[in-house]
């Protein structure tokens, strides 16, 4: 059977020819599967539009992610369906995936299962110790109604405060054919209690950025006007594998970046 076709029968173990399965969704996960013939099960979204590559700030990580995803899809190296949950501790050396179309099994008896992200793995606590970060990584995304044309892609905004620590700029997709006007996202690190306080709301982020950012990017005072689009709240989780009968499972670190050499090599091999 070919993975790309998605011909997976419920309660029937789906056999793969790959030596390893990678569960994750970082840029590094996709790149490893492209380079080393691993099979990918996505358990999370692509990078947000405002994060960009270190070697070319005008190149969003999301675009690179999509390019790698299509390479995997056309070569049958990625599970071609949305996964709602993953169960690893199933009998007879198989992995169960729950999807919008039903419950499906993948035969993992002779495969190594690499985990870089524990999202959607519903039985992770049965064989791993999970730790939660006490803080949340919060991104407030804004449309720039005024002050959107400048040459900056990143500003280390306020190291002394947890609110509005960093600002990421990205080419706005709200204007057809636009190559110059940028919207922005503001990163904050907040605790659960701080998230509930109005002093840390998206309104206060907007006030702070509109007041202080113009001088940092070389535009005149009062020349920035923002409209809030969305707030993204993420919490990071760590895990360590303890004793488990699932001896074929290993932990790998998620890599959320790609070097210029890796990117150029991938593009040239397409």
Image (cartoon, grey):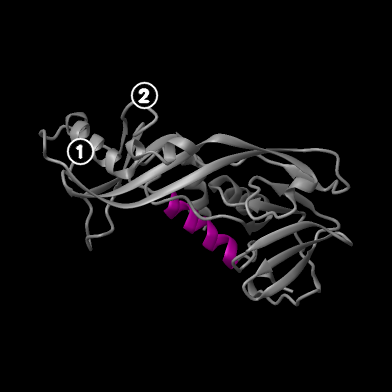
Magenta extent: 61-74
Label at residue 210: 1
Q: Position of residue 71 (x, y in %)?
A: 55, 61
Real-space Cα separation, disc 1 to disc 2, in angstroms: 17 Å
Residue 64 falls inside the magenta stretch: yes
Earlier along the polypeptide chain: callout 1 or callout 2? 2
Query: Badges 1 and 2: C-beta atoms under 8 Å apart?
Result: no
Residue 19 in which image quadrant: bottom right
Compared to residue 262, the image places residue 121 above or below, namely: below
Q: Is residue 111 above or below residue 105?
A: above
Above or below, comparing residue 32 to residue 12 in the picture: above
- Crowd around label 2: few <14 · some 14–19 · many ≥20 (10 Å): few
Magenta stretch, main secondary structure, is helix
Q: Quadrant of residue 121?
A: bottom right
Q: Position of residue 100 (x, y in %)?
A: 62, 73
Would residue 33 be seen by someone viewing this image from the given angle?
yes
Q: Secondary structure at mark 2?
A: loop
At a point 57% along the width and 45% down the height, the residue shown is 28
Q: Secondary structure at mark 1?
A: helix
The tag on residue 133 is: none
**Placement of the N terminus among the 4 image quadrants:** bottom right
Left or right: 31 as drawn, with respect to 106: left
**Residue at position x 64%, y 66% from top?**
76
The disc placed on residue 159 is 2
Residue 254 as seen in the image, left or right of residue 105: left
């Amino acid at each position: 059977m070919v993975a790309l076709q998605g011909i997976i029968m419920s309660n029937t173990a789906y056999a793969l020819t790959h030596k390893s399965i990678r569960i994750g969704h970082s840029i590094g996960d996709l790149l490893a599967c492209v380079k080393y013939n691993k099979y990918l099960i996505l358990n999370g979204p692509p990078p947000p539009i405002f994060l960009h590559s270190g070697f070319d700030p005008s190149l969003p990580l999301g675009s690179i992610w999509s390019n790698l995803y299509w390479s995997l899809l056309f070569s049958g190296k990625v599970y071609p369906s949305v996964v709602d949950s993953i169960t690893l501790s199933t009998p007879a050396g198989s992995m169960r995936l729950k999807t919008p179309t039903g419950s499906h099994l993948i035969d993992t008896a002779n495969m190594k299962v690499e985990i870089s992200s524990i999202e959607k793995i519903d039985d992770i606590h049965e064989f791993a110790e999970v730790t939660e970060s006490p803080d949340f990584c919060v991104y407030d995304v804004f449309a720039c109604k005024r002050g959107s044309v400048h040459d900056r892609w990143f500003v280390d905004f306020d190291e002394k405060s947890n609110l509005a620590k960093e600002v990421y700029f990205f080419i706005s997709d709200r204007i057809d054919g636009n190559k110059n006007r940028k919207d922005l996202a503001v990163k904050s690190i907040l605790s659960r209690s701080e998230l509930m306080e109005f002093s840390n709301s998206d309104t206060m982020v907007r006030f702070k950025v509109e007041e202080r950012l113009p001088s940092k990017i070389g535009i005149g005072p009062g020349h920035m006007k923002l409209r809030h689009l969305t707030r993204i709240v993420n919490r990071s989780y760590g895990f360590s594998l303890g004793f488990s009968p699932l001896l074929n499972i290993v932990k790998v670190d998620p890599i959320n970046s790609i070097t210029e050499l890796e990117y150029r090599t991938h593009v040239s091999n397409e």
